[in-house]
Image: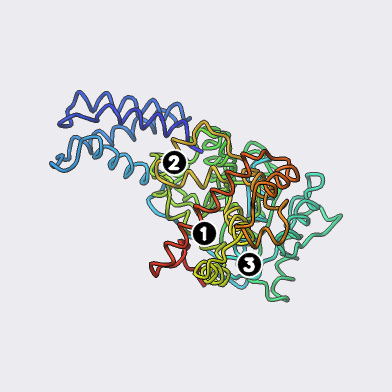
């Protein structure tokens, strides 16, 4: 995500390193390269020019104090302006109402149905809300079934009326049932539509008029670049939505939509889709996104993901076993399982400052832990509970059983011992394991 634009902006800012001051000459060269990076990321020229003009004006208007180099000041200014461009601060979703109604709109193939299920999962598991999904796409074959399957995955009921072709009637009937059952949030998934299709645009406008939703969200595929911004504007002119959702931000996107859609439609980006799993949905934070674009990582989001998956009781048990020198491969495997729940490994590493550059050309798939899991899985229960018993013959058997080499087994044993020593050292100093407390 943003790897291309990140490297180009970093290269542009590099031209100021070693300079004693910011001048018209050296800032012009830097700003030119930043503008080129934005254009390559599919940001429209007028927005890219206005952005870089503001950066230049800010840079020339500030004095470089002795303790800060011009390059560091430019990073700060670009970060501030990127944050402003994307909306300055996170904007929460409005779920007040009895029930609160959230209407989902967007183009065909933008990921509306999947997002609807992800949002239901988010509201149910992170906000503690009672949620109902409504199948309002009566045109796409299997759309209702897809939502029902996803609803079952996230444990949320789906209201559907097979054979009914009026989405306004379906949505209103769903709303009536939701009131009877005490549902707190109703999410209405709708059919994909083109902004030039007047009949379909009339339909979504009628849905909004009839339901009077607390929140209308426009879902856009971030991989469509500048076209996504134009479409977002056309939809906003017609239905005046409350916020934008960017899907597929984990894909091979140039980032132009994320950078400029807020500026163009003057509506906040509220969520971003970062993967295929139902929990792969993040609240959009402009400052954190600016951090990641500039290669500064996003430690706050990393900690928040850890908090969501952290099992405090299990951590206490592991800490006790560390003190008694009983930490074993079962514990190691349990911790790997928690890390895997946090999301895509390359995305997680990108949240650590400096790591995005190191992992830029490295393929880190969801199967990164498979070799470790297969090796531990080939151990007997006794071996997993007693790591010190692993002699040469046992390692040979484990390697053969897991389909890995003896070198890979030895490497895992060393990694395990290093991890155990590090964790024991932290525990011996009176500290807790390096995981945050889970929020209630």
- The answer to whether residue 274 is left or right of residue 436 is right
What element does badge 3 sit on?
strand
Residue 94 in the image: x percent, y percent?
52, 63
- In the rendered image, which residue does mark 1 sit on? 306
Above or below: residue 279 compared with residue 294: below
- Give the spatial CA distance, label 2 vs label 1: 18 Å
What element does badge 2 sit on?
helix
Task: Count residues near mark 1 (Cα–Cα under 10 Å), then give few for <14, some for 14-19, many for 20+.
Answer: many
Above or below: residue 111 compared with residue 342: above
Q: Nearer the viewer, mark 2 or mark 3?
A: 2
- Give the spatial CA distance, label 2 vs label 3: 39 Å
- In the rendered image, which residue does mark 2 sit on? 355
Q: Residue at x 54, y 48 (%)?
A: 414
Q: Residue at x 55, y 64 (%)?
A: 310
Residue 352 in the image: x percent, y percent?
43, 47
Q: Earlier in the sequence, mark 2 or mark 3?
A: 3
Q: Nearer the viewer, mark 3 or mark 1?
A: 1
**Front in this rendered view, residue 90 or 134:** 90
**Front in this rendered view, residue 416 or 294:** 416
Label 2–label 3 contact, CB within 8 A: no
């Amino acid at each position: 995500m943003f790897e291309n634009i990140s490297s180009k902006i970093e290269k542009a800012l590099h031209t100021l390193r070693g300079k004693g001051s910011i001048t018209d000459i050296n800032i012009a060269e830097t700003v030119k390269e930043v503008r080129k990076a934005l254009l390559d990321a599919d940001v429209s020229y007028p927005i890219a020019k206005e952005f870089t003009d503001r950066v230049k004006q800010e840079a020339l208007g500030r004095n470089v104090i002795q303790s800060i180099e011009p390059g560091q000041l430019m990073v700060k200014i670009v970060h501030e302006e990127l944050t402003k461009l994307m909306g300055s601060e996170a904007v929460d979703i409005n779920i007040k109402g009895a029930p609160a109604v959230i209407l989902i709109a967007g183009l065909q193939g933008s990921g509306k149905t999947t997002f609807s299920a992800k949002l239901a999962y988010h509201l149910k598991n992170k906000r503690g809300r009672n949620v109902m999904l409504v199948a309002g796409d009566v045109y796409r074959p299997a759309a209702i079934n897809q939502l029902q399957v996803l609803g079952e995955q996230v444990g949320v009921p789906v209201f559907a009326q097979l054979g009914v072709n009026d989405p306004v009637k379906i949505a209103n009937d769903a709303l009536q049932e939701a009131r009877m059952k005490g549902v707190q949030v109703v999410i209405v998934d709708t059919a994909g539509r083109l902004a030039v299709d007047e009949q379909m645009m009339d339909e979504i406008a009628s849905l909004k008029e009839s339901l009077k939703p607390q929140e209308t969200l426009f879902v856009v595929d971030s991989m469509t670049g500048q076209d996504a911004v134009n479409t977002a504007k056309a939809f906003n002119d017609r239905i005046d939505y409350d916020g934008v959702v960017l899907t597929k931000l984990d894909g091979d996107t140039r980032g132009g939509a994320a950078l400029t859609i807020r500026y163009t439609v003057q509506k906040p980006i509220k969520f971003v889709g970062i993967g295929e799993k139902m929990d792969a949905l993040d609240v959009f934070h402009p400052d954190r996104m600016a951090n990641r674009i500039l290669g500064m990582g996003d430690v706050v989001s990393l900690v928040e993901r850890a908090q969501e998956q952290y099992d405090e009781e299990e951590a206490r048990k592991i800490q006790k076993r560390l003190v008694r020198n009983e930490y074993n491969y079962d514990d190691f495997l349990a911790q790997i399982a928690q890390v895997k729940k946090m999301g895509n490994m390359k995305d997680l590493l990108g949240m650590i400052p400096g790591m995005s550059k190191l992992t830029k050309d490295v393929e880190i798939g969801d199967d990164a832990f498979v070799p470790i899991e297969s090796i531990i899985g080939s151990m007997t229960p006794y071996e997993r509970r007693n790591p010190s018993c692993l002699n040469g013959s046992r390692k040979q058997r484990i390697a053969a059983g897991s389909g890995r080499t003896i070198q890979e087994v030895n490497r895992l044993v060393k990694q395990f011992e290093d991890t155990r020593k590090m964790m024991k050292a932290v525990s011996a100093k009176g500290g807790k394991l390096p995981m945050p407390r889970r929020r209630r």
